[in-house]
Structure formats: structure tokens, C-alpha cells
């Protein structure tokens, strides 16, 4: 029986019915605490009365709510009242994709955009190990501005008891074609009743994208059985035969989604989203035809209705996630932005900065192996950028003089300037890591270093007359200092250890240290603010949160009565936001990092691919036989450690997130195989932090190496397999495996990359590459060169290393541990340019020499980075 108007469910007052949705009735309601309209789905009493189903529902609700993604419907609350179990979500205005498709096929550009947004939402869900299982047009909601929200997460699985195996099971429905999913959109593995993973959702996206482009489904029949047979046995029609103006690249994407075997599809929603974004952004050769292929929209009347599926589980209210110092919480209505590409050339582009009039964008882009300063006019689409510098070092982090006549930038640890129209660059101040200029253009504020450490200094706009200000705490680091628009505050994105946002009053006070404002976002990932920019009102800031696992996203924060709103989140690293003077556009860098494993034949010195994939294959480590390697990979759509047979070619997982049911696993990296080949040590990153574990290679329960040490890193086995040495926040420690004893402190000057061989431990110390006895005595610095990665020869007689030259070339060298002499063996080619806005970031890691000393394996980065823009949609 429907609930009458005025019914109270906790703090929510029912206003009017919105209709049925999934398994339950949906109502518009009023949140009397926060004075806003919401949607409430009231579930059947059969769910509330069944303790098992109720427990599963609540658990799933918490998991989906924690997604906090703009393409997933936001969940605000769950609760019970009398015999009712209910879910509270945001209220949406618009229509479902299913309603839109009743008018026929969509314009190609719209179809690509909607599919990319769907893929981004699914990627966030899959990262939390949540599979949709029933993706179809009726479960995709289109807001009036074209923004996509995925609905009905988890309901198919929750609606009936699927058993612990997760296999698909039939359930009763008024639609005979519903089998824990709607027949026409199901994957082959769903049709067969097999267990499904994230790749099943990718198949469903392919079906929906096909229907958006053509107005018909790729698989259909007279009955549900005929449709299932087509899904299992028939190839989808060729898209060009149905729509002769579609670009070939789009047809390939759709068909890749619709492969019958999961292993032959896109292996993650991240891969799919990136492929669609690339096509849409114009970086694909076929992208130019997308706009030409878009048919005129079908004329029809669209009824915009209010709809919210409260059981469609989505992003959790951020109040429970934000660590903010002693302040109240409310949620404002966010502005609506659309995403627009700005600089999408082949080269890496990063760290954008708007000119004072908002007409020109300055940024760093790779040219000739180094980052140079470029400018371009965003309103002149397709025009070429202007290159202002031709330097033999990276020119990074540009910002403008308020006059618009000059651009400041950083080269190594010095502040430089160049004319906005070009000219000869000039060096202004040395030993500076960050800087900003006052709105009136008269004063620079610098994070400058001297013998006393880092401090905030002031200087004139040409760097003259420096005056030392407040001392910063030891270890404080930032690349981002920015004046507020009114010139009364200075913000710093950084900190000591974990990154924060800090504020200081201006003029600076020597005795008053800046104040922490934003610290972290628990409990999703240990996150920090590394980059930010002010909105014109001086009250709001755009933040880049970067987590320990390397992901990053953009948020809008209110500093007066803090609200935190997600602005942009995807599988890409979203970095370095820059707000234009009016606050209508936010430029940022979107980067993708692809690692492959390469092999060097140490006799011929030839370099060949060993393990390659679409996103990430890294951290190789040889097994004792030399015929297999262990490595980290995301080829399954999540972070795992796999083993590969070099002779037979097989790959199989050996450690996966399923081994850790306690909490979500973000990363499994840095595998180190025991000398006897029976166990593997590795680093696991979870919401609890970064810790080392050991697992039997044949399978078994993981064992935490040291429960007490924080942020554990870089494990290396002793030659006898009894000990492991590792790094924990600057300390080099060793622990006897399986003893349960506390670790032993070896040194306190370590930063990573340990290698143990024949009574000697090699590690990266703050003073350079260092070797010590295994008890920590007799330390000797072997090299202060830029050695990206290194490993012992099997007999301990020499050290192999890959170094980067001043000309940004990679070289394989050997180093004699007795006299520190370095000998070049081979040139490996150019070093890649990392798109992360932090200067020199290693693009080679985990060099490992095979047990027979004849081969070397290492991970190599293939990066890409573009500059995009969030543009406010005007109503």
C-alpha cells in the first residue's frame, strides 16, 4: 500500500509518490534536518523482515555509498521505520536514457559522451569491487545538462539470494526476460549462469552504446530464449552497415566491448573510458569524423520529470568522509560543469595557468625531450600553441604577472621569467621550490631554502631585496603557493609527510606559522592536498586530492563553513587545477600512466618487451629458476600480482584482493620472491595504509610482516631466505620471517629500493646509493648520480643500474662496489617525460637481474597527459 502524504520516516516527510523503481516504491520527500528535497525508496516488507537480505542490503548500501562519484547516484542515508526499510538519495531532474531512446538513435557525439560517463562511473564502482549486473538504458539517468548518473547499483544482486558464488540466478518478474539483469543487455557469462566480474558490465556498456548509435540492440529475438541464443552465438551487426557515417575507431571500440569471451574485451572500465575520451577529444585520427557523423536530433517532445531511484546505490554524503577541524557540515547545490579539451597534442602537457584576463592559457609541454613553456588561446579551436622557451632542462609550474606581460616558471630549483610574447628567459631567484605574486604585482612570496632550512620569503617582482619570513617545519614541501584574490591570504598546498592545505595571513608574520585547514579524507584512502587554486570570491578553493595509491581528483571546498563537492573524477590522474578570473572555467591536466615490463639481454644488450598491457604491468621479480617472473598488473581490472612463464607463455594470478576480505585493497605491488621460490613478499595498500605481507606462492593466507611499522616499503630477502629488510618512513629495518619478533633497526637514513646480496645490503640513502654490512655497519656511499633503479649481479661482484643522463637519455651501467667506478654498457634510448606536475619523477623502476646473470628485467613508463577544462554551464 502506498504511503500517504505526510508520512514521517525518521527525519524525512513524504511529499508525493514518484512511482515504482526496481524493488520498491519511490517518493519525493523533505529532509527536515537539512531543509532540502530528496528521494526515498521504500523497500518491500519481505526484505526488511528477512535478516539475511536486510544485512546484505545494508552492507551493499555502505559499499556503493562510499563510491562518491559524479556519475553514480548519491546515497544520503538508509534507515528503518516501523516495518519499512528505506534508502535516501539525491533527487534528479531529467529523464532516463531509455526514455530518450524512444525517439531513436542519438547523435554520435552524445552517445560517446554518455558511454564515457557510464564507463567512468563503473570504473569507480569496480574499484570498490561492486559490479552493476543490470546496466541498461532504464538504469542510466540523463540530467538536463547531459550529465549521466548510473542507477540501480547492486539491486539485481540484492533482490534475490544469489548464493555465495555470485552466480546468476533466475527470479520472478513481470518481464520474462529478466535474469539478474535484462536479457538484451546481459553478457554471455550471465546468460550461462556463471559467476561474473567487472567485464560483464563492459559487455553491457557495449550493448547500450550500440543502441544509442543505431536505435536497435545488437542481439534480439522473438523470445527471451532467442535473444540469449543470439548473445551466445551470433556476432553483432557491423555498425557501418547501420550507420555509414560512423568512424571506424568507434566501431572497433563497440566490438571490443561485445567480445564473447571476457578475456578478449576491454579488461577494465578505465580502459574503455580512456578509449572513448581519446576518440571524443580529437586525439584519435578518426575523431574528426565524429562531429560530421552526428545526425540532426530527432524532433520530439521530451517530458522532463523528477525521478530518483532511492535504491540505486551511489555516492555517500561527504559529511562522513571529510576530516575538517571542528566545523559544521551542510551540503550546497553544486554548479554544473561540462568537460572540454584544451590541449590534446601527442606530447605530454601539464600545469596550466590562466592569464589575468582569462584569454590565454600558459602551460608546460614536452618538446625535444624537455618540458617547455607554451601559451595558447582556448577560444581559437585548432590553433597551434606558441612555444616561449627552448631550454635543456624542464620548465615547469608557470604563473602570470598580474600585468599579463610576463610569465614566471621554475627550472630545477630556481625561479625564472620570460615575456608573454617570448624572448630570452631570465633567472631571478635560486633555491626556490614554490612562489606566488601579489595581486598588485609588487611582491613575490617564495618558499626559499638556506642553511637554516625552508622559510617563506618576500621579494620584489624581479626577485630583488629578499626578506626572510616565517620558518617552515622540517620536511615541509610544496609546489603550490597562491595569493587569495584580495591579497589578504596565502594558501599553501603541501605539508610535512601527509599533504594538507595551509593558510597564512598577509603580510606575513615571522612569529605566526600558517594554519592547517584541510587535512585528509578518511576512510576511503589516505589522501592529501598537493595542488589548489582560489575561486574569485576568496571563500572557495578548487583542490586536487592525491591518494597514497596515486589516484587524484578535483573538489570544490568552502573555507568559511566548509562544504566539499566533487568536481571531476575519472580513471585519469587529474592534477594542477587553475581557475580563470571569472571562476567559470577550471583548467587541469589529465594524465594516464602505462607501465610495461621490458627485458635486456646482457650479452647482446638488446631490449625487448616482456610483459605489456593496456594500463599497468610493473615491478618485475625473477623466480629462482629464471623461467618465470612475478609482476604487478591491473590487467584484470584491479591491482593484482601475477606470475608469467617465459617459456610456456602462461599467466596466472598469485595474490589478489580476494586474499584480503577485511577491507578494500587498492594496490598490490613490489613483489619480492624468496630465494627458495616458495613465498613472495609484497606491498599492499589499503585504507589502513601501506604494509608488507608474505604469501605462499602455492596459495595460502597472507601474513603481515610487521604489524607495528607504518608505511612499509621495498622488501628484499636475505640470501638464506630467513630475513627481510624493508624501509619504514626513513628507517631501514630487518625482521626474521615467521618469528613474530619485532624488527631490528638497521639505519635511519633510507628512502627505498633495498637489495640484499652476500652479506651486503644496498639501498637508496638521502646521501646517495649506499652499501652496508647486513648488520648496518660500515656504510659507504657508492654514487650520488641519478640512478633510477639498480640490482646486484648474482655473485655480488658488481651492481647493474639504469641512469638518466643530463641529456635525458637512459643508460645501462655497472658499478663496482669496491671502488665505485661506473662503466657504461649500453644506451637504452630516451627517458620518457612524466606528466605528473612534480618535476623529475622516475620513469624506470625495479631493475632485476636474472638468477643466471644473463638477463635483466625492468618496468618502463609510457605516459600521456592532456589539458582539459571544466566549463560552467550557464542556465
Image (cartoon, rainbow, N blue to C red):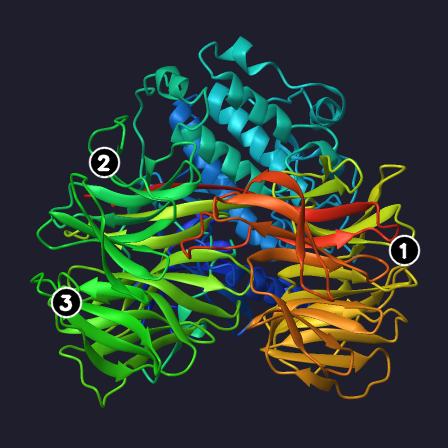
Marks 1 and 3, the one that precedes in the sequence? 3
Residue at 17 percent across and 47 percent down: it is 355
Dot 3: within a 10 Å radius of its alpha carbon, few (fewer than 14), some, or many (20 or more) residues?
few
**Disc 1 to disc 3, C-alpha distance:** 60 Å
- Can you say whether 361 is above or below 490 in the image? above
Q: Is residue 276 left or right of residue 604?
A: left
Coordinates of residue 63 in the picture (x, y in percent):
58, 63
Marks 3 and 2, the one that precedes in the sequence? 2
Dot 2: within a 10 Å radius of its alpha carbon, few (fewer than 14), some, or many (20 or more) residues?
some
Query: Which-is-in-front pick, marks 1 and 2?
Result: 1
Coordinates of residue 717 in the picture (x, y in percent):
81, 69
Residue at 12 percent across and 69 percent down: it is 487
Query: Is residue 761 among what the camera can see?
Result: yes
* Label 2 sits on residue: 378
Dot 1: within a 10 Å radius of its alpha carbon, few (fewer than 14), some, or many (20 or more) residues?
some
Q: Who is closer to the viewer here, 368 or 744?
A: 368
Which numbered tag is attached to residue 464? 3
Coordinates of residue 440 in the picture (x, y in percent):
7, 62
Query: Which-is-in-front pick, marks 1 and 3?
Result: 3
Which numbered tag is attached to residue 624? 1
Q: Secondary structure at mark 3?
A: loop
Q: Who is closer to the viewer here, 329 or 811?
A: 811
Q: Quadrant of the rendered structure where residue 659 is? A: bottom right
Marks 1 and 2, the one that precedes in the sequence? 2
Q: Secondary structure at mark 2?
A: loop
- Can you say whether 290 is above or below 431 in the image? above
Amino acid at each position: 500500500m502506498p504511503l500517504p502524504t505526510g508520512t514521517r520516516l525518521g527525519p524525512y516527510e513524504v511529499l508525493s509518490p514518484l512511482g515504482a523503481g526496481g524493488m520498491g516504491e519511490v517518493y519525493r520527500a523533505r529532509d527536515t534536518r537539512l531543509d532540502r528535497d530528496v528521494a526515498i525508496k521504500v523497500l518491500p516488507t519481505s526484505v526488511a523482515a528477512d535478516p539475511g537480505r536486510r544485512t546484505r542490503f545494508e552492507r551493499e548500501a555502505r559499499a556503493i555509498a562510499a563510491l562518491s562519484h559524479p556519475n553514480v547516484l548519491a546515497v544520503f542515508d538508509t534507515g528503518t521505520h516501523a516495518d519499512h526499510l528505506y534508502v535516501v538519495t539525491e533527487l534528479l531532474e531529467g529523464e532516463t536514457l531509455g526514455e530518450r531512446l524512444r525517439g531513436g538513435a542519438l547523435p554520435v557525439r552524445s552517445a560517446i559522451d554518455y558511454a564515457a560517463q557510464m564507463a567512468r562511473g563503473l570504473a569507480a564502482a569496480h574499484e570498490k569491487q561492486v559490479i552493476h549486473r543490470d546496466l541498461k538504458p532504464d538504469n542510466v539517468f540523463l540530467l538536463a545538462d547531459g550529465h549521466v548518473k548510473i542507477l540501480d547499483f547492486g539491486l539485481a544482486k540484492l533482490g534475490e539470494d544469489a548464493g555465495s558464488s555470485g552466480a546468476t540466478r533466475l527470479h520472478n518478474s513481470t518481464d520474462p526476460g529478466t535474469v539478474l539483469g535484462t536479457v538484451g543487455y546481459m553478457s554471455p557469462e550471465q546468460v550461462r549462469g556463471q559467476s561474473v566480474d567487472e567485464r560483464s558490465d563492459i559487455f553491457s556498456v557495449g550493448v547500450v552504446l550500440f543502441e544509442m548509435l543505431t536505435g536497435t540492440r545488437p542481439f534480439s529475438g522473438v523470445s527471451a530464449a532467442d535473444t540469449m541464443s543470439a548473445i551466445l552465438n551470433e556476432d553483432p551487426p557491423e555498425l557501418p552497415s547501420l550507420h555509414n557515417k560512423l568512424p571506424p575507431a568507434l566501431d572497433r571500440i563497440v566490438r571490443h566491448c561485445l567480445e564473447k569471451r571476457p578475456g578478449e574485451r576491454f579488461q577494465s572500465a578505465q580502459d574503455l573510458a580512456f578509449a572513448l575520451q581519446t576518440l571524443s577529444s580529437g586525439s584519435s585520427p578518426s575523431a574528426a569524423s565524429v562531429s560530421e557523423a552526428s545526425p540532426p536530433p530527432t524532433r520530439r517532445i521530451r517530458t522532463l520529470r523528477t525521478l530518483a531511484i532511492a535504491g540505486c546505490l551511489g555516492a555517500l554524503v561527504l559529511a562522513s568522509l571529510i576530516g575538517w577541524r571542528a566545523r559544521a557540515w551542510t551540503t550546497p547545490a553544486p554548479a554544473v560543469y561540462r568537460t572540454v579539451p584544451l590541449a590534446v597534442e601527442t606530447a605530454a602537457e601539464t600545469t596550466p595557468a590562466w592569464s589575468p584576463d582569462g584569454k590565454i592559457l600558459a602551460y608546460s609541454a614536452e618538446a625535444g625531450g624537455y618540458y617547455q613553456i607554451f601559451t595558447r588561446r582556448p577560444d581559437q579551436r585548432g590553433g597551434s600553441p606558441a612555444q616561449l622557451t627552448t631550454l635543456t632542462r624542464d620548465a615547469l609550474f608557470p604563473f602570470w604577472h598580474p600585468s599579463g606581460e610576463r610569465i614566471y616558471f621554475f627550472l630545477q630549483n630556481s625561479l625564472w621569467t620570460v615575456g608573454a610574447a617570448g624572448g630570452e628567459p631570465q633567472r631571478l631567484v635560486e633555491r626556490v621550490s614554490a612562489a606566488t605574486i601579489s595581486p598588485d604585482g609588487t611582491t613575490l612570496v617564495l618558499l626559499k631554502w638556506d642553511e637554516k632550512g625552508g622559510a617563506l620569503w618576500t621579494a620584489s617582482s624581479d626577485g630583488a631585496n629578499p626578506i626572510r619570513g616565517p620558518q617552515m617545519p622540517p620536511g615541509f614541501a610544496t609546489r603550490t603557493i597562491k595569493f587569495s584574490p584580495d591579497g589578504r591570504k596565502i594558501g599553501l598546498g603541501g605539508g610535512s609527510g601527509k599533504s594538507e592545505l595551509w593558510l597564512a595571513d598577509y603580510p606575513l608574520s615571522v612569529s605566526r606559522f600558517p594554519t592547517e585547514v584541510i587535512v585528509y579524507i578518511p576512510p576511503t584512502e589516505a589522501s592529501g592536498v598537493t595542488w589548489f587554486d582560489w575561486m574569485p570570491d576568496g571563500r572557495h578553493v578548487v583542490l586536487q586530492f592525491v591518494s597514497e595509491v596515486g589516484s587524484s581528483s578535483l573538489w570544490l571546498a568552502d573555507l568559511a563553513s566548509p562544504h566539499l563537492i566533487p568536481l571531476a573524477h575519472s580513471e585519469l590522474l587529474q592534477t594542477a587545477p587553475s581557475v580563470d578570473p571569472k571562476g567559470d572555467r577550471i583548467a587541469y591536466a589529465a594524465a594516464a600512466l602505462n607501465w610495461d615490463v621490458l627485458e635486456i639481454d646482457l650479452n647482446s644488450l638488446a631490449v625487448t618487451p616482456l610483459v605489456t598491457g593496456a594500463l599497468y604491468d610493473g615491478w618485475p621479480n625473477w623466480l629462482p629458476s629464471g623461467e618465470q617472473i612475478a609482476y604487478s598488473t591491473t590487467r584484470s581490472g584491479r591491482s593484482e600480482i601475477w606470475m608469467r612463464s617465459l617459456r610456456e607463455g602462461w599467466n596466472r594470478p598469485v595474490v589478489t584482493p580476494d586474499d584480503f576480505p577485511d577491507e578494500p585493497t587498492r594496490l598490490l605491488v613490489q613483489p619480492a620472491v624468496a630465494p627458495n621460490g616458495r613465498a613472495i613478499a609484497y606491498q599492499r595498500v589499503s585504507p589502513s595504509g601501506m604494509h608488507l605481507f608474505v604469501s605462499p606462492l602455492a596459495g595460502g593466507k597472507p601474513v603481515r610482516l610487521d604489524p607495528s611499522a607504518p608505511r612499509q616499503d621495498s622488501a628484499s630477502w636475505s640470501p638464506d631466505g630467513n630475513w627481510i629488510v624493508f624501509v619504514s618512513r626513513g628507517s631501514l629495518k630487518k625482521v626474521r620471517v615467521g618469528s613474530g619478533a619485532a624488527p631490528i633497526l638497521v639505519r635511519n637514513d633510507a628512502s627505498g629500493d633495498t637489495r640484499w646480496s652476500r652479506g651486503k645490503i644496498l639501498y637508496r640513502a638521502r646521501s646517495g646509493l649506499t652499501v652496508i654490512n647486513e648488520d648496518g655497519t660500515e656504510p659507504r656511499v657508492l654514487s650520488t648520480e641519478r640512478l633510477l633503479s639498480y640490482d646486484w649481479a648474482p655473485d655480488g661482484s658488481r651492481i647493474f643500474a639504469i641512469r638518466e643522463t643530463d641529456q635525458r637519455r637512459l643508460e645501462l651501467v655497472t658499478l663496482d662496489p669496491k671502488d665505485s667506478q661506473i662503466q657504461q654498457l649500453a644506451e637504452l634510448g630516451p627517458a620518457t617525460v612524466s606528466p605528473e606536475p612534480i618535476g623529475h619523477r622516475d620513469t624506470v623502476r625495479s631493475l632485476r637481474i636474472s638468477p643466471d646473470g644473463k638477463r635483466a628485467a625492468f618496468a618502463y613508463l609510457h605516459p600521456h597527459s592532456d589539458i582539459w577544462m571544466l566549463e560552467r554551464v550557464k542556465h
